[in-house]
Image (spheres, helix red, strand yellow):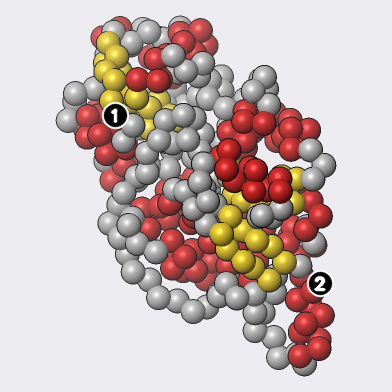
Amino acid sequence: MYRKTTSAFVALALPVVLTLAACGSSGSSGSSASPSAGASAAADAGSLTIGSADFTESALLADIYADALAAKGVKITKKLNIGERSVYVKALQDGSIDFIPEYNGSILAYLDPKATAKSTAEVTAALPAALGSKLTALTPATAQDSDTITVTKATADKYHLTSIADLTSVADKLTFGAPAAFQTRPDGIPALKSVYGVTFGNFTALSASGTVTVTSLKNGTIDGADIFSTDPSFASEGFVALADPKNMFAAQNVTPVVATAKVTPTIKDTVNAVSAKLTTAILADLDAKVGTGDPDAVAKQWLTSVGLA
């Protein structure tokens, strides 16, 4: 997906229809205070125009943060599905939007193509300089939507694979599948060789579709694949994402980026509280629940379940 690299797919799962009214996006806090006191509280809480990229997970994350903030009295306007990174970064810079859920490694690479940071700690430390003084990255979630080198459980068991490094002695017997661009991406096939000494016996170019990749891995057309860490197939098919201890792939933690001038204590605390609850497994589960359904309904249900509505 372009949220991290130049490839793109949006995983589809069974849609669900959820109807909840526990937390709205109107910015109402539900307080019984007088109108003047309520207006003062809302003003203190702040206001944000929240955007998203034009894929489902980004819209879902935007809804999650927006609805949590609205429940705390922040005045929220949503402008979702804006477009790709070049479009919404411009919107952040010109003030058309004030907030967007990002992936820290991707936004760092976009703003600073020469950046070498890879781990979560390194990327987090490098990001403020790349963003500049007008934009602030709040605390990243542990949730990552990152590239993974993935195999079936049967393959992992057969070759005793837990890490990408374990492929070194067996990769020449295996076929790897990914979009064609993975063959030349700096963090693709070249990095497998330079970082881990891994060279697959064959490479199969696949269309940039999660469904195609998952099906090919499941039916044995390929033995390994590049699959994003929040893909529902990890739960549904039991696939195994091999550990990447040398950070071949840059960290892709969900990281809220907000206009510095718009940050209030309420906004900072609420956003960080949401991020603290988001794990990769939870985000994958929420993606699966959305399917082709309503991201906002899924967002509201989850926020209610974790006490943030």
Amino acid type for the residue under numbered disc 1: Ser
Mark 2 — residue? 44
Residue 211 falls in image quadrant: top left
Residue 207 numbered tag: 1
Q: Is residue 43 left or right of residue 73?
A: right
Depth check, front residue: 295 or 288: 295
Residue 21 position, x and y percent, is: 49, 79
Badge 2 crowding class, 10 Å Cα cut-off, few under 14, some 14 to 19, many 20 or more, is: some
Residue 154 position, x and y percent, is: 24, 28
248 relative to 106, above or below:
above
Q: Is residue 277 visible?
A: no
Q: Secondary structure at mark 2?
A: helix
Residue 261 position, x and y percent, is: 81, 55
Q: Are marks 2 and 1 in contact (CB under 8 Å)?
A: no
Taking the spot 76% from the left edge, 67% from the top edge, the residue there is 46
Taking the spot 63% from the left edge, 42% from the top edge, the residue there is 89
Residue 20 falls in image quadrant: bottom left
Q: Is residue 247 visible?
A: yes
Badge 1 crowding class, 10 Å Cα cut-off, few under 14, some 14 to 19, many 20 or more, is: some
Amino acid type for the residue under numbered disc 2: Asp
Residue 88 numbered tag: none
Going from N to C along the chain, the mark reached first, 2 or 1, is 2
Q: How many labels sit on residues?
A: 2
Figure quadrant of the C terminus: bottom right
Separation of marks 2 and 1 at Cα, in angstroms: 49 Å
88 relative to 44, above or below:
above
Taking the spot 75% from the left edge, 76% from the top edge, the residue there is 42
